[in-house]
Amino acid sequence: MAGSPLSALDVAFLCLESETSPMHMGAVVTFTARGPVDPAAVTALLAERAARLPKLRQRARAELFPPGSASWAEDPKFVAAEHIHHVTLSSLYEPDPLAAYASRWIAEPLDTSRPLWDLTLVTGLPDGNFALLLKLHHALTDGEGAYAVAAGLLDGVKLPDPTPSRPIPAPRSTLDTVKDTLGTVWGQANEAAGIASSVVRATRPTLSPVSAPASAERRLGFVRLPLSELRQVRKAHGGTTNDVVLAVLSGALREWLVNRGHRADGRTLRALIPVSVRGRAGGQVGGNKLSGYLCDLPIGEDDPAERLRVVRRAMTRNKAAGPSRGAGALPLLAGRVPPLLHRLGTRAAGQAAPLLFDLVITTVPVPPARLSIDGAPLSEMYPFVPLAPRHAVGIAVATYRDSVHIGLQANGAAVPDVGSLRDAVVKSMDRLLDAS
């Protein structure tokens, strides 16, 4: 059965896919076991729930018209259990076996001829706990939509109606309909032209100090920060929790670059910060509904409080301009490009990503309700964003209950030890807290 068409942005994420730039999002989620874990029972439960989720039963199918387009179609050979795996880890060979295994796991691309997801149950963790490792291709959905998909695997999570009822509009004349259509097309064309002009102006002539060679290797790092500490900083200096997180990451990237032999003083690193426009797009669960902001992280500033002030000013300007303007709205521009052009040129254009931004920092929204699987409460949730071509690191953030969970994904050839960046995040948080 045919499903909905992929948007031009969804197609773009498929076109960016390669062996060295797999375009799936990931999550490493740990659970506190309340007794011995039965892997067969848990995987069977996951398979049963996955089979009920329409998005997980569909694969992307190329269409003849419009040229280069694609749509979602039911996979006639779909078996949920074939996407779900189980491994048991041992602490005999790795100091952090979960991070080591997850680094190898996330480096493996998804098979784009099948439904674009993969789930692994990991047992053998300390105290009998276990983890779920989930991959979802970015063509399938964005970070906010990913939670809506993944939540269907958890205990008792009620998802919002993806098609809320709306009042039926009054009949309109053909002339009014044509006028509205032309107005929409003209408005979108002007918006796209403005974004394209901003992208050209924002492109920098030199490569990023954190650019990286193409590599299929990945390294993952997990950082957990107390939410109470970020709120303490926010209370002292103002801004949002997200501003505080960006300031913490700015300090961490400063120290990390210095430790790698780079000059930090007087420099910035430009982050692309994805912004959901899902509410503006009607609230659908599937597909990508994204824009973005560009934020120059003040890594050249040694004072942690001043770093936060600079980040606050930059993000205030971004929000005042809105998500439909500026070079950060590149995802909106990609959504205006015909799918055929993505098929022809997106992969080559992706190689120029370091000329526009140095890394992606994204936030995945997670409701505060207590979550569990098979009765085992969720304890930690680390999201991971795909690495853009030639980028050394990407960062994803999720706040759950009383903690902020930061997932670090690094190019293994450029960053053989992500532990130094992980430690720098903790140190940067401590410095900012001391300044508060």
Image: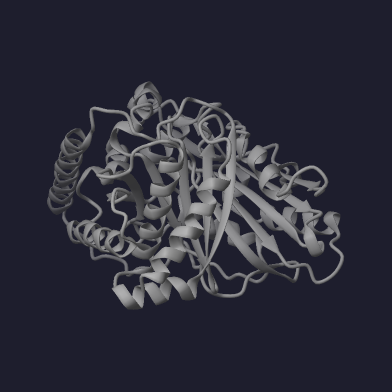
Q: Nearer the viewer, residue 52 or 210?
A: 210
Instruction: Where is residue 431? Give x, y as percent.
Output: 42, 64
Which residue is pictured at 66% across the width and 37% down the height? 104
Q: Nearer the viewer, residue 57 or 36?
A: 36
Q: Quadrant of the N terminus?
A: top right
| Whole-percent x, y for residue 103 in the image | 63, 41
**Picture layout, residue 48 above or below residue 358:** below
- Who's the residue at 50% across and 48% down the image? 421
Residue 163 shows in this picture: no
Q: Residue at x 46, y 49 (%)?
A: 395
Q: Quadrant of residue 319?
A: bottom left
Q: Nearer the viewer, residue 72 or 123?
A: 123
Instruction: Please state if 325 lies on the left or on the right of 252 as rendered.
Output: left
Residue 310 can be seen in this image: yes
Left or right: where 415 falls relative to 178: right
Q: Give percent across and percent down for residue 197.
A: 16, 36
